[in-house]
Amino acid sequence: MAQAGAVDIVRVPDRLAFTRNRYLRALQTPRGLLGLGLVGTIVLLGILAPLLTPYSPTFQIRLQELLPPSGTHPLGTDELGRDLLSRVLNGIRVDLIVAVVAVPAAAILGCLAGLLGAAGPGWWDTTIQRAFDVILAFPAIILGIAVAAILSPGERAIVVTILLANVPIFGRLSRDALISQREREYVVAARLIGVSPVRVLFRHIFPNVVDPLIVQLALSMSLAVFLEGGMSFVGIGIQVPQPSLGNLLNEGLPYLATNVNYAVGPMLTLTALVVGLNLIADALNAGVLRR
Amino acid sequence: MDGVSFQVAASETVGIVGESGSGKSVTAASILRMVSPPGRIVGGSITYRGLDVLAMSEPEVRTLRGDAISMIFQDPMSSLNPVLRIQTQLVEALDAHEKYRGSKSRPRAIEMLRQVGIPSPENRIHDYPHQFSGGMRQRAMIAMGLGNDPGLLIADEPTTALDVTIQAQILEVLRTLNREFGTAVVLITHNMGIVAQLCRRVVVMYAGQVVEEGPVEQVFARPDHPYTEGLLRSVPRLDSIRHGRLYSIDGQPPQPGEQTSGCPFHPRCGYRIERCASERPPLAVLSSGHRSACWVTQAGGELGAATAGAATGGRRAPALGAEVAPLLEVRSLVKHFEIGGGVLRRTATVHAVDGVDLHVGACETLGLVGESGCGKSTLGRMVLGVYAPTSGSVRFDGADIDSADQSHLRRYAQMIFQDPFGSLNPRLTVEQMISEPLSVHGIARSAAARKRVGELLEMVGLSRRHASRYPHEFSGGQRQRIGIARALAAGPKLLVADEPISALDVSIQAQIINLLQDLQAELGLSYLFIAHDLAVVRHLSDRVAVMYLGKIVESAPTAELFANLLHPYTRSLISAVPVPDPRPQARPPRIVLQGDLPSPTAPPRGCRFHTRCPIGPLANPERRICIEQEPPLDPHRPGHLAACHFAGEAPAIETRNAMA
């Protein structure tokens, strides 16, 4: 019965535009590739740290304090005679844990909170949103000081601070996206078919709201690295002798005039990591969101 | 657009007709040299009163714009600046030119508002755009465009975003302006009815080219291009005899930028000859002032023979009078929405649906008509349980729909949406979408489901090959077919179609209407067909119910309703529809309703229509009953219900020209 007509596809645009590969395509831009390169290199250096240097980051070599860069110690040594390259590379590992564990955890918790707000009763939503407002009113570093005061400084304080600072960001983003999608006709259509609410949420709505969340994830990772640096720099983050990019910077500061190499290593690494993550966020933003 | 040429004489009205992407808006924009990059005017000439527009300097063109030639746009919501008062915007337009500068500008602005029919313009001129209704904003735009007595007004789909009764008001304004001030009007539209009612000459565009041009009477009586013929024949009309199927133009209009050889219409043309595919036909004069670009008619061929898509009219006899329980039964249904609210804020109650009874029998189509904001979409969604009723009940297939188990409703009642872009999930493939109802209701899985998806796609006129594609790869009409296939997947008994064709191009609408009719005949479906277009509703429905401000004001079997109009609102709705026939005798007497739809947060007391009614207290002040007492929906003729104290009384205007 169907009158056939000319029902050929009229447009054949890039098939990839709406598949997961669109992330790959967004990253295959100069910005994206540079970001991936920077971040990838640093991640690799961090993971392979024990293989790349013969010294333990805490091993003190007698009478070898504050050496300038040389063949045996490419970044020199610190005031206690520890190999700086080894300390920097091992310091990266803390940042990786922070970025790869704490931020995704914050994203998941934030999305759940946003979901509760969007799906729950009105007063519930209001309560959650106001709580987010309160947290967002404080700069992350202030939150960090409070957390460190309660939990005592250390890796745990950094992770908790990153969670606190990022849960509201993801919570708000996901809530707004969910609410804007919920009234869309394709969602109504799915409900009318009899699709269960959970399935509507995860199969229909979630794929349509995930883009801004992914971009925020990259951005939050960069902020997390930054925050680790900040907290450790002021002494409420990773405690010596364990190295982190932040406390290495702090320790190198007094020697800036005499041993520039001390601070330069952690500084360049930290900067490259932050810039790289930002470039990735930027490329995703341009390629996925703004089209 | 490509090689378009036409002329507009002083104080003439010319209609430019075409579908989206046919280049009609670009044509209008180029007259004022407003083509946005990357568009460019690469050749040709534009002459206004002997002046070459293309040779002008930019300041000269600016003087031309708004002074000699002005333009109004489709969307009155976005073409006025929301943060500036109407006065500021009107005066600005006047101050930019010589004629009404300085102290003369404000009186002139008020005068213009009065001319376009804004009540008490001295006060309303201080309003912000959001305080104006859609129709009033469009009037304000027209006032702005006409302030400097332009010789030419270009109106780009000026009524497309408006309701029919408001559209009738705006068209009346344009007609008056043209008659009294001699302003030439170029009216861009896709609606052949508007052209017939308002224009002297018509230019039909297709794929960026003029395919036919001529005096309206000649073109409508004897179109010389198959596309024009198709456009005229594919639209259901209020004044024609209902027949089984609509004439439809197959296929899709070409995408802008798509290169075609020969005549751009030949892939869809039922008359094509060999020459059409290879050589592009020139625009040739056929009779005085009537030109067309078609090899067939230029060779002396006649149109009217081809019957593309015209199968036998397979309308099954509706199950009228059968003593079976109706499939869908709605009783005193009410839906009030609370809006506003929050701390220290008053809430307002929107009376979206206010006591509606209706029923739809098996294999029956009930048409639900009304203007935007009358509650018809809310009603449609409540029937499917999307919104819970404030009070009243909906029974579907013998069970209340608010019962705990909704699986029966979900399987056997489905919806077709208005927006073919928003109603499909952009992240799912066609197959994932259509097979979802199959898995949800445990009908079919994996290979069986895939087979069924293929069958469904073919049933709605698509191909199995399309199953793996994403929605953005389809055109509007094709997406609507996908939506219909999804609705059909679980084998429903009832389909609620909420304005299913109003977002589609004219030549595609007929395809979808025919598809809906074929499916009904084949599968024995019932439809609740919600639309604002009376002609389409009349064409498709067994019975029609007319809604106004949350209530049904008239309902009857289709033939009975259109033969004996009882409610003045139905009458005015019908008279507001522009009939695509320019002959004076075909023109029904126009009842132009006053004012706008009252807000559903505060519906008028008594009869809700009394604030606009042509036979109510406005025309007959002694009729207090309309203000004081709400008329019940009573039968006035067999099967014909109307809610009016003076049902059947014709408005005064009609006594001069019987409507029959």
Image (cartoon, coloured by chain):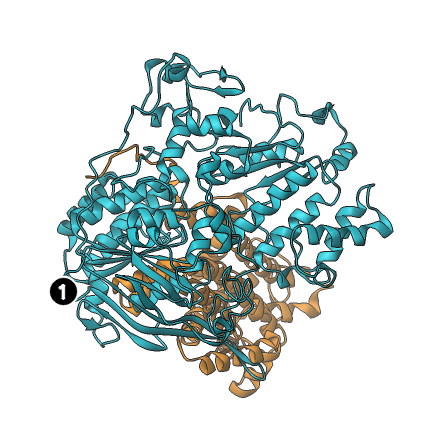
B612, B258: nearer the viewer: B612
| Amino acid type at image mark 1 | Val
Residue B190 image point, x, y percent: 47, 39
Colour in which chain A is shown?
orange
Does dot 1 land on a helix, a strand or a loop? loop
A173, B4: nearer the viewer: B4
Q: Residue at x 64, y 27 (%)?
A: B9
Q: Residue at x 62, y 55 (%)?
A: B137
Residue B180 shows up from this direction: yes
Name the residue at the bottom extreme: A150
Quadrant location of the N terminus of chain A? top left
| Chain identifier of the cyan chain | B
Q: Residue at x 40, y 50 (%)?
A: B533
Q: Is residue A104 shown above or below B342?
A: above
Q: Chain of mark 1?
A: B
Residue B198 image point, x, y percent: 54, 38
Residue B460 image point, x, y percent: 24, 43
The part of the image, by quadrant, that contains residue A105 is bottom left
Q: Is residue B281 shown above or below B330?
A: above
Residue A75 image point, x, y percent: 59, 58
